[in-house]
Amino acid sequence: MSSDYYIACKECKESYWIGQDGLGGFLFYSGEPKCLEGLTPFLAKHVLCGTDPIVVPEHRVEDYKEVEW
């Protein structure tokens, strides 16, 4: 069974889907242009929130607002 992974801001309770982990290991969506286009604005918005954005599995962001890409 695979698990999605997100970059999340604990301060703002927002998350951004960046990859998944499964039988083949962890896959960062570096080949998805839409993912990469939205990653910089997400990080720029949240890097100065008071807590560093962190990479977490999907069960840790269930109550977060997902920023779509």
Image (cartoon, grey):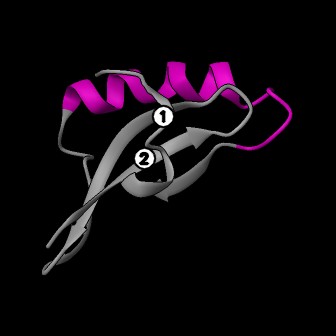
Q: Residue furthest front?
A: 63
Q: Is residue 52 left or right of residue 66?
A: right
Residue 5, picture quadrant: bottom left
In the rendered view, would you say 61 is above or below 58? above
In which quadrant is the C terminus drawn? top left
**Mark 2 residue crowding within 10 angstroms, few (<14) / some (14–19) / many (20+):** many
Residue 33, picture quadrant: top left
Q: Is residue 24 left or right of residue 8?
A: left
Foreground residue among 66 and 33: 66
Q: Kindly report the secondary structure that dominates the magenta region of the rendered protein.
A: helix
Q: CA distance from mark 1 to mark 2?
A: 6 Å
Residue wearing tag 2 = 6
Residue 59 position, x and y percent, is 41, 56
Residue wearing tag 1 = 15
In which quadrant is the N terminus drawn? bottom left
Q: Is residue 60 left or right of residue 10?
A: left
**Mark 1 residue crowding within 10 angstroms, few (<14) / some (14–19) / many (20+):** many
Callout 2: SS? strand
Residue 8 position, x and y percent, is 56, 41
Q: Which region is colored magenta? A: 33-52
Q: Earlier in the sequence, mark 1 or mark 2?
A: 2
The amino acid type found where label 1 is placed reads: Ser
Callout 1: SS? strand
Asked if labels 2 and 1 touch by Cβ distance under 8 angstroms, the answer is: yes
Total numbered labels placed on residues in the image: 2
Foreground residue among 57 and 27: 57
Residue 62 sits inside the magenta stretch = no
Which residue is found at the position 65% from the left and 43% from the top?
53
